[in-house]
Amino acid sequence: MQVNIPLKKTIDNSYDITINTLEKLHFNQKVAIVTNTTVSDLHLEYLKEKITAKELIIITLPDGEQYKNQQSIDKILEPLFENRFNRKSLLIAFGGGVIGDMTGYAASIYQRGIDFIQIPTTLLSQVDASVGGKTGMNNKYGKNLIGAFHQPKAVYIDPYFLTTLPSREFGAGFAEIVKMAVTFNEEFFEFLQDADMKDQQTLVEAITRAVKTKAQVVAMDEKEHGIRAALNYGHTFGHVIENETKYEKYLHGEAVAIGMVMANELACNMDLMSNEQAVAVKFLLEKYNLPVDYAIEDIERFYEAFFLDKKSSDTTITFIIPKGIGDVVISDKCSAKLVKSVLKQFGANK
């Protein structure tokens, strides 16, 4: 005896990404703004002036990747229960990638799922983290290993928030822009080589191009079963670096920058990228004071950590490898010998 549950249906998760000065937002429901101490001090009043809601509460978390954990998720959920939020209520992620990921994850699990919107305040979150519906948190085994795909209802990118962004945070966001250009758009990479990001119009153009690139990829592969994995260029290496340094030494984009340099070295060893192209990427990262080197203390431990990457299996590791500039290869065929030879080039005793 079999009983079939017919659940075949089409769900439209489409949403708009608005890149402009934030306009008035009106909500006929309970709304919680989730932010951190840094963004709250700088911009919360600005946002509150833009919002009207049936009821508005503020949830403020500590600032930092090290707080991207279950304890912070509980700090989001508990006020929602205390204030009787229901399935029609809304969360607003107001901060960088950490706040966006955790708010989205909390929204995905509160009463089995409520809506949220993204108002990103860092360059990294504006061009990457706020778009695509990846949500989650870290644990002792690695980065973003717990989470869900939960698309926002809308994303509002206001360049105003970048006026208070420290240069180091700006560089971390620029790394994600470079990532998208190297993997998908050679002409965009050439634009970045000559661009002056201090010019507001140029900056908005770069943000727009990066967002359009990611939006196209997400539309093709929402749940990362194929081409969307290419957006993890630099991340396979970078996540190990972040975990080894306990999320305290490097910003996410800084670790990704080092990871891209490592991935480029792998590509050069596979004759997929020329040394000149690898140098061009490295030079562009260094232009924004991003780190491009890392001393690996234990090659074997670093290699074994790859198996905790979400793209990998228990026997194979999936690497995102640039094919020149503007194209990419996703491969689980890289031999351990080849990968370890690349890692040795970054070894502490090299």
Image (spheres, grey):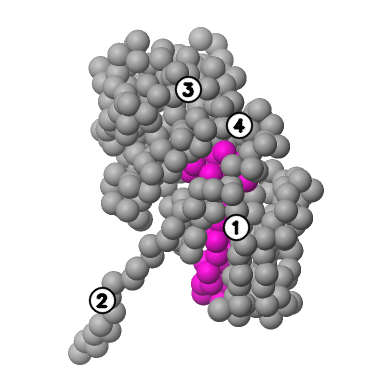
56 horizontally vs 28: left or right: right
Quarter residue 93 falls in: bottom right
Question: Looking at the image, is mark 1 or mark 4 earlier in the sequence?
Answer: 1
Secondary structure type for disc 1: loop
**Visible in this render: residue 138?**
no
| Figure quadrant of residue 317 | top left
Checking the image for residue 23, the label placed there is: 1
- Vertical arrangement, residue 165 with respect to residue 71, above or below: above
Is residue 260 or residue 28 the one in the foreground? Answer: 28
Give the residue displayed 76% in from the left and 46% down from the top.
42
Q: Between tags 1 and 2, which lies in front? A: 1
Q: Is residue 323 left or right of residue 65?
A: left
Badge 4 marks a residue whose secondary structure is: helix
Dot 1 alpha-carbon crowd within 10 angstroms: few under 14, some 14 to 19, many 20 or more: few
Earlier residue among tags 2 and 3: 2
Task: Give the residue at mark 3.
Answer: 195
Q: Name the residue under label 4.
A: 170
Q: What residue type is labelled 1?
A: Glu
- Amino acid type, label 3: Ala
